[in-house]
Image (cartoon, helix red, strand yellow):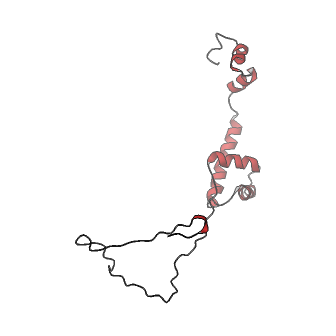
C-alpha cells in the first residue's frame, strides 16, 4: 500500500485488502523508542535474574526477585517476555540410586585390570547394562 499510494487512494486500497485506514497510518508511524528501550532493559534484567536463579525460578518467584531489585513488572508481562525470550525453568530430577553395594553376594574380580587393548580378536569381551525407567518401572 505504501508503494501504491501515488496511484490509488488509501481508502480504496484499504477496502480492497480488508484493512482500516487508521491501521495503515499507525503502521507507518515509527515505534515508540522509550517503550522499546524499556522492554530491552526488562529483557536484560529478566535474563540476568533467570541465570542468577540457575534457571529454576518460575514466573512468580522470578517476579518477586525482580520487584526486590526495584523492577516493576506484572506477572502477565513477565510470562509474555519469558515466552518470547525462550526462558523456561528447569526442575532437577531427584537421583535414584540403582546399585546396592551392601550385600553378601560374591563379587567377581576384575580380570582386565583396566587394560583395554586386546592383542588378538575375541581375546576380551565386555558388556554394560543400561537402566530405563518408563512410568516408574525399572527396566534393564
Count of numbered tags = 0
Displayed quadrant of residue 127? bottom left
Of all residues, the one furthest to the top in this rendering is 7
51 vs 126, left or right, is right
Place of residue 24 in the rendered image (x, y in percent of width and height, measured from the top left): 70, 23
Percent position of residue 15, x then y: 72, 17
Q: Which is more toward the observer, 120 or 90?
A: 120
Residue at screen point 33% across, 80% down: 113
Q: Can residue 72 be seen here?
A: no
User: Which of 129 and 20 lies nearest the eye of the viewer?
Assistant: 129
The answer to whether any part of residue 86 appears in the image is yes
Residue 3 spot, x, y in % from top left: 61, 17
Q: Residue furthest left?
A: 120
Q: Looking at the picture, how far across and down is residue 41, in whole percent? A: 67, 46
Q: Check the image and report above or below for 23 versus 101.
A: above
Name the residue at 67% across, 41% down: 37
Quadrant in which the N terminus appears? top right
Front one among 140 and 79: 140
- Note whether 91 is above or below 113 in the view shown: above
Task: Establish if 123 lies above or below 68.
Answer: below
Identify the image quadrant of residue 22. Answer: top right
Amino acid at each position: 500500500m505504501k508503494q501504491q499510494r501515488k496511484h490509488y487512494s488509501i481508502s480504496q486500497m484499504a477496502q480492497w485488502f480488508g484493512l482500516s485506514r487508521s491501521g495503515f497510518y499507525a503502521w507507518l508511524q515509527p515505534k515508540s523508542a522509550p517503550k522499546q528501550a524499556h522492554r530491552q532493559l526488562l529483557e536484560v534484567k529478566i535474563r540476568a535474574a533467570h541465570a542468577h536463579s540457575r534457571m529454576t525460578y518460575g514466573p512468580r518467584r522470578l517476579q518477586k526477585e525482580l520487584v526486590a531489585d526495584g523492577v516493576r513488572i506484572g506477572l502477565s508481562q513477565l510470562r509474555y517476555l519469558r515466552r518470547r525470550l525462550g526462558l523456561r525453568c528447569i526442575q532437577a530430577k531427584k537421583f535414584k540410586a540403582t546399585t546396592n553395594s551392601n550385600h553378601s553376594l560374591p563379587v567377581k574380580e576384575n580380570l582386565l585390570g583396566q587394560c583395554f587393548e586386546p592383542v588378538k580378536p575375541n581375546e576380551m569381551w565386555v558388556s554394560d547394562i543400561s537402566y530405563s525407567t518408563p512410568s516408574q518401572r525399572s527396566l534393564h
